Image (spheres, coloured by chain):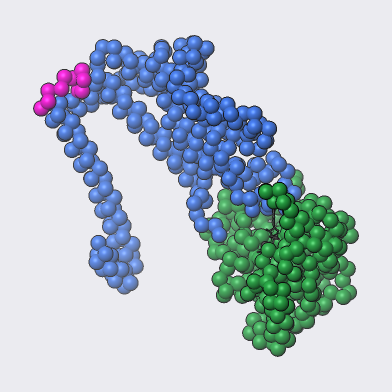
Amino acid sequence: MRHVGRIELTAAKPAELRTTSSKARTPLVVAEGVAKTYRTVSGGNIAALRAVDIAIGEGDFVCLVGPSGCGKSTFLRLIAGLDVLSTGRLTLAGSPLVGASPDVGVVFQSATLLPWLSVYENVRLPLRIGGRRDSDPGRTQRLLAMVGLAGFEDKYPYELSGGMQQRAAICRALARDPKILLMDEPFGALDALTRERMNVELQRIWLASQKTVLLITHSIGESVFLGDRVVVMSQRPGRVLQDFRIDLPRPRTFEQTTSDPEYLRLVREIRALLDSTGGDEA
Amino acid sequence: MSRQDVHVREQASIDLPAQAHAEDRLSLLGRRNRILLTLAGAVVLLGLWHLSVVVLQVPPYILPPPATVVSALWNGLHVPLMSPVGFYVPLASTLYNAGMGFLIGGLLGILLGSLMAEFRPVETVLMPYAFALQSLPKVAIAPLIVIWCGFGDSSKIAMAGLLAFFPLMVNTFTGLRTVDPALLDLMRALSATRLETYRVAKLPAAAPYVFAGLDMAAVYSLLGAIIAEFLGAQQGIGVTITQAQAVTDVATVFAALVLLGITGIVIHTVIRAVERSVVHWAGRANA
Ligand SMILES: Nc1ncnc2c1ncn2[C@@H]1O[C@H](COP(=O)(O)OP(=O)(O)OP(=O)(O)O)[C@@H](O)[C@H]1O
Ligand SMILES: [Mg+2]
């Protein structure tokens, strides 16, 4: 079941060489003064983001938390190329982001698998789009094995549990071997126990795949458990309030990490900060 | 029933094959009961029909007794396949015209529904006409179509096609417009072209709507072909009906109607079977 060492999705450095800080890494995504104003149906303007500055280093696991409606999803959609920023600068690997990029993989809150495609076909979907040729047919199999879905290739999404569907969606997001994985509350719809399992699973996938991850979550515990950094945003219009560095040792386990005093301190601190912004975060 | 169930379960915990066997028998019994009930209903209905004809002395040119209808059906079916006096040749002709209309009208409906859903200008230009035509009783157009297309097969195909066109256009349009926005986000995040999005995401997502349209269109195209036949044709089941009517052979009219009813059920069943295998995923939980 655990393939951490054996999966070569990129020219990966061994997991044990990873550091938990991003100081030595080149920024992969850089946001400078990114603002987004939506036009409402009634003709008014809604400022969703104002002047967001974030640099996400290569290989970083960044968690984004903030009050509901503060613009987290908006920020993610900008990086995914699903929306266009109003002002500011947003670069991926040094070049400005225009539209969707194959270097960006997205996992949405619901798995959004195509119900008429098998798990295998769903994961392979990104390789079929854009006139691509599936150069490495074994890759899909390896991805599925990595998330523990080997043997489920021919199943249909409705035959999978919610957690399995979300794991398949993660595979799909990794299909093009993107540089960064964007996840918008990917486990929000799961029960607490499945969610904990998925967190451990995601950490394992991250360690194995060496991807950069930007994860939006409503759970402070989840953000501290998973992240190298936890970025806290303000009320709408969102901006970065504080950027917490999480130096808990990896691989983290629920038993050890969640009882680690450092973990508890960070959770308390982030919660206090969110409370002081008047956000309705739990 | 539930006590029986419990009993079967208890037995099954000891002996699994016995459970399978018992459940088999139970469901078989249930199915047999249902079939028996349906048959009993039919027998009662036929009996009432026969009785009312006899007791009320309904003349056979108004309502023939069931036995006469059955014998008319038998007469129409107990002929060589190619015989012009039987039901086979007219039915085949009607089915061919209805089928051609179904294909042509249906494909055009899917095509135009797709164009309207995909391109706003097309929608803006065509929607008013689509609605106007849709709310028109299309049967009223039949005489016009006969004038344009003549008394041959083409007027039947045209009428069948016209009636098949609308449900498919409307359903395809609706299906394509109600696609989950999250799926469209996904396709955009993958930099899918418009055509890819249509082919890979939108059209399959609209398939349940399209199938509902196909089901309606099948019935309508049969209706369209027969209406056109009523207005004049060399052959067809509609001609069989009007000819029988002309000589007040009501039993043959009934026999033809029974035949059409059976045909309709067969077509519906086939479409449902295809639908079940193609859109097997529809209506299943996919959270
Ligand atoms: N398409 C849109 N048109 C108009 N306003 C929008 C649109 N999308 C988002 N908004 C507004 O922008 C603000 C930020 O929305 P966003 O979805 O980014 O919040 P969020 O931080 O992801 O919230 P949540 O935690 O509840 O998911 C909200 O006030 C929302 O109403
Ligand atoms: Mg959101």
Drawing shade for chain A: green
Q: Is residue B200 visible?
A: yes
Q: Residue furthest bottom?
A: A261
Image height of A82 relative to A256, above or below:
above
Q: Nearer the viewer, residue A53 or A252?
A: A53
Q: Quadrant of the C terminus of chain A?
A: bottom right
Q: Is residue B19 above or below residue B275?
A: below
> Where in the figure is residue A46, as x and y percent of width and height?
73, 56
Q: Is residue B77 visible?
A: no
| Displayed-image quarter of ligand 2 | bottom right
Instruction: Give the residue displayed 31% in from the left and 60% down from the top.
Output: B23
Main SS of residues in magenta: loop
Q: Nearer the viewer, residue B79 or A192?
A: A192
x, y percent for residue B223: 41, 25
- Where residue A88 appears, as percent x and y from the top left, is 85, 58
Q: Between residue A12 and residue B184, name the one nearer to us.
A: B184
Q: Is residue B57 magenta?
A: yes
Q: Is residue B231 left or right of residue A27?
A: left
Q: Is residue B59 magenta?
A: yes
User: In screen coordinates, is B115 left or right of A161?
Assistant: right
Magenta region: which residues?
Answer: B55-64
Q: Which chain is blue?
A: B
- The residue located at (28%, 57%) in the rendering is B25
Residue A281 sits in quarter: bottom right
Indicate whether A121 appears above or below B195.
below
Task: Residue at 72% x, 82% y: name it.
Answer: A269
User: Where is the N terminus of chain A found, in terms of image quarters?
Assistant: bottom right
